[in-house]
Image (cartoon, helix red, strand yellow):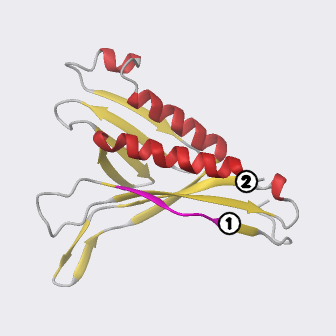
Amino acid sequence: MLSRSDIVLVKHFYQERRSSEEQSKYPEIRPGIFSIRPVWVYEPGKQSAGLKGAVLMVRESYFFDDGNMRGGEKAEATLDLDELTDMRNALSQVQSSSAPWRASAANDEIELQFSAKDDFSMSAFHGESQGDILDMQIGPRSVAINLVHLPEIIQNVDAVIQLLNSKS
């Protein structure tokens, strides 16, 4: 539908939800951000045949040096509703204390990874060298969010899925 040029499309964008990296010990560094924004695209009168999903965005951390911004590059990816549900299931695996990957996490470094079609991937890391983080990556851009924020991220993804499922 989106590749055709001979149709009128309605694009509904809904409220963006954000999660941030931890503030560094250097107050001049602005933390990176991961955001998810629901979107519903359809032809007028054909809402049930429309596409539902979300635009994901990462903005890397940045700082200002003599008035010039250093860092802060952004990247976006689009996930459809099925991919969002798969992402939610992957986040459940990260969160679950009974997940098989956690059994050997006591002394090992572990990575749990999820990838989607539009160059989006997320990896949960556990281990001494990098701590417990969720790395959200789109192309070459990424943010590393402490896993203590995982419930917030899950809540945001759940809210997006619920909103999109309520539209007809």
| Residue at the image point whose x is 45% and y is 53% from the top | 138
Relative image position of residue 92 (x, y in whole percent): 46, 31
Going by the picture, which residue comes out furthest to the left?
Answer: 25
| Residue at the image point whose x is 81% and y is 71% from the top | 5
Q: In the rendered view, would you say 63 is above or below 32?
A: below
The secondary structure making up most of the magenta span is: strand
User: Secondary structure under badge 2?
Assistant: loop
Q: In the rendered view, would you say 154 is above or below 55?
A: above
User: Which numbered disc, 2 or 1, marks the residue that appears first in the sequence?
Assistant: 1
Tell me the number on the disc at residue 12.
1
Relative image position of residue 38 (x, y in whole percent): 59, 57
Q: Left of 124 or right of it: where is 159?
A: right
Q: Which amino acid does label 2 sit on?
A: Lys
Residues packed near mark 2 inside 10 Å, few (<14), some (14 to 19) or many (20 plus): few
Q: Are marks 2 and 1 in contact (CB under 8 Å)?
A: yes
Q: What residue type is labelled 1?
A: His
Q: Is residue 15 magenta?
A: yes
Rendering quarter of residue 60: bottom left
User: Secondary structure under badge 1?
Assistant: strand
| Observer able to see residue 2 | no
Q: What stretch is highlighted in magenta?
A: 12-19
Residues packed near mark 1 inside 10 Å, few (<14), some (14 to 19) or many (20 plus): few
Tell me the number on the disc at residue 162.
none
